Amino acid sequence: MLIFPSVNSKGRDRVRKHHNFMQLRTLIFGFLTLILPASFCLADAATSTDAARNRCSYMGLKDITKFTKSSGASNEVVLISPEIKAPIDWDELVVSWNVLKGVHLKMEARAICPDHITKYYTMSRWSDDTDHFPRESVNKQGDADGTVSIDTLILKKPASKVQIRITMGGGDPTAAVKYLGLSFCNSQVQPVALKPNKSAWGKVVEVPERRQNDYEGGDGWCSPTSLSMDLAYWSDKLNRPELNHTVPETAHAIFDQGLDGTGNWPFNTAYAGSYSGFRAYVTRMDDVAEVEDWIAAGIPVIVSVSSYIVSNRTIGPDNGHLIVCVGFDEKGDVVVNDPGVSVKRNLRARRVYTRENFVKAWKKSKNAVYLVYPETAQIPKDPFNHWDHSN
């Protein structure tokens, strides 16, 4: 059994404070999982399909013309969405955005619950020019309804709808906002195993290898290192040299002043999605079979996992870790570019992790991924509504 204790370690990639109500809920569900008979844990294909649709769901918005528009301070514009009906009842939300370079924004969200509406929570403040506007997550927003943990709105009770408010400057909103992504999760529902996509077994996408500790200050740079590898792959494939940046350049571009680190998920995808013709967002999946679908399509997937996957530990500090899934071997084990490998031992970033260990480590983030690809890419079919399909 893997144990993931909370730790506050400044400068690491992914430090998340686990609030008491979340800890209690996790303990209860873990206990129930242990005591329930095996017959209750086994489901037929139809039940598995339903569960895969009910645990997490994704909505991509390219058209914001239905958002109301008003003037804000300092030549800013305030955009408020209609109430958006989520595909599932949810208690966690991650918002992604792709905007043009030079645009700054404050992203807010509020939950529409059956009996009341929450306050607007600040999901992030974003800018590619921090001399002009901050790029930061906002701490200490907790109240009776929930809180924001870095980039994730966590509710104490499920909601059915959400409303988004964007305060932005630096461009015409209808042109500047290329894309919004809403990743909903019902943490009460457990992920289900899906049938493997064996067409991805034996296939490796040749993503360049990079190691975070090759750079001074790189100990907490697993996320920008993974992102820089991913963008370097697309740079080579599309002959677009402007996509290929060094690890320190990428870390600087997505640094979160509020977190004092580089592990803010939507900041990474916002940076990638600011490039012309690119879409990038955070979402959650149910099973490694869905990652296989993307590999079969020739698209690498950045995956948020437990840092134990690198050190092979099961106790002690675990701040999370980002790696790039680049393929699968002939047995279905997971081939990755892991930026956290030992530089002192001169290990390659290219590693193979057993399927079982990968699945355990991925649970740390409730199966979160970054999907980064050209808007014209042929992406895999999405039977469970776990990623964008608005092309």
Image: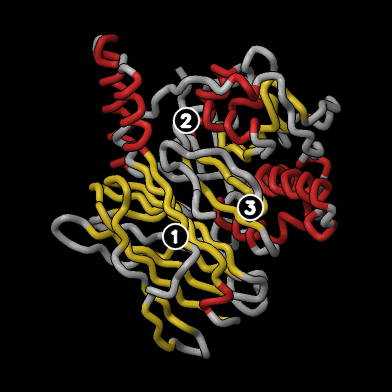
| Quarter assignment of residue 335 | top right
Quick one: label 3, few (<14), some, or many (20+) residues within 10 Å?
A: many
391 with respect to 277 (left or right):
left
Q: Position of residue 59 (x, y in %)?
A: 42, 53
The circle on residue 262 is 3
Residue type marked 2:
Lys
> Mark 2 against mark 1, which lies toward the viewer?
2
Mark 2 vs mark 1, CA separation in Å = 24 Å
| Residue that badge 1 annotates | 139
Picture colour scheme: secondary structure
The residue at the point 69 percent across, 14 percent down is 330
Dot 3 or dot 1: first in sequence order is 1
Q: Position of residue 123 (x, y in %)?
A: 44, 61
- State the SS at label 3: loop
Residue 332 vertical placement versus 368 (above, below): above
The residue at the point 50 percent across, 85 percent down is 76
